[in-house]
Image: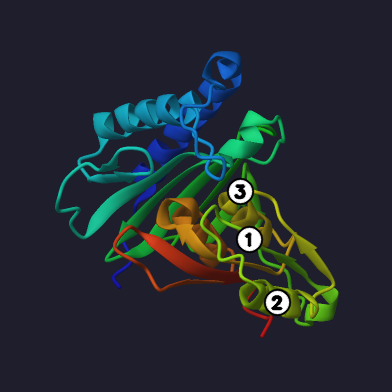
Amino acid sequence: MEVEDFSKEIILAKKAALESGKLLIDKKKEFNKILNSNPKDTKLKADIESENLIKSIIVSESTYPILAEESGKSSDDLGDIFWIIDPLDGTANYNRDIPFCCVSIGLVKDMKPVLGVIYDFNNEDMFSGDKFTNTSMMNDTTISVSQKSDKKESILITGLPHNTNYSDNSLNNMIKDMQDWQKIRMLGSAAMAACYVASGKAERYQESGIYLWDIIAGAAIVESAGGSAEILNMKENFQVDIIFSNSKIK
């Protein structure tokens, strides 16, 4: 894949993420209203309002199509280069005042992540990474993955999406894998999990049945921080399995 300079797009994504994050903080009392009745998949007014703001900012300065969590495709043919937006990753956390949630905006070319911006608005931390500079940042500081190579000294982040297979066999396999690691964490935000791998706070994040908008920005940030981001088994509804790691853990 030819590496292009998407520096203007990074600036635009940061602008959209910052404005959206500010809105989610300032209007939380108004936006923290559940819109659906699915007990496993919380959907708030915040998701809709955040996405509308992000899209309005993006389309004002970019002609690339958009794939967004709430509204889907902006065009039947997304083309080779398009935006992928998760307006509020960690909605259930936001709803319950658990401070692990964020805004996630990525750009892909030929279905490969080329840039990602994730704004942890609770802590005012802006994570970014791109394949042109091959650098990842948290605010003004360069970040990189950890150098640990032994699972017994490492942290695994994982999760259970709302449509997880809870059969005994599936859960037993998950537990068997968990036993190899020093510690296991479940954050409730795929994007924040990716940022923690990229900044060396954990060595791997893996999850099955997550969605492309949850993880694409994080994939760019992890790869630009020196890690690896495997995106596997993508379905027509953009559901995927992922393994993000520092590339040292086998």
Q: Is residue 87 above or below residue 198?
A: above
Q: Which residue is mark 3?
A: 189
Residue that appears at 49% across and 63% down: 209
Q: CA distance from mark 2 to mark 1?
A: 29 Å
Q: CA distance from mark 3 to mark 1?
A: 14 Å
Q: Is residue 21 above or below residue 199?
A: above
Residue type at mark 2 is Asn
Q: In the figure, is residue 29 to the left or right of 177?
A: left
In what element is the residue under mark 2?
Answer: helix
In what element is the residue under mark 1?
Answer: helix
Q: Nearer the viewer, residue 210 or 143?
A: 210
Residue that appears at 52% across and 56% down: 218
Q: Picture coordinates of residue 159 (x, y %)? A: 64, 59
Mark 2 or mark 1: whose residue is earlier in sequence = 2
Quarter of the image with the C terminus is: bottom right
Residue type at mark 1 is Ala
Mark 3 or mark 2: whose residue is earlier in sequence = 2
Q: Residues within 10 Å of mark 3 (few under 14, many from 20)?
A: many
Q: CA distance from mark 3 to mark 2?
A: 23 Å
Residue 198 shows which numbered tag? 1
Q: Nearer the viewer, residue 71 or 15?
A: 71
Residue that appears at 72% across and 79% down: 177
Q: Which residue is mark 2?
A: 172
Of badges 3 and 2, nearer the viewer stands 2
Quarter of the image with the N terminus is: bottom left
In what element is the residue under mark 3?
Answer: loop
Q: Nearer the viewer, residue 116 or 43?
A: 43
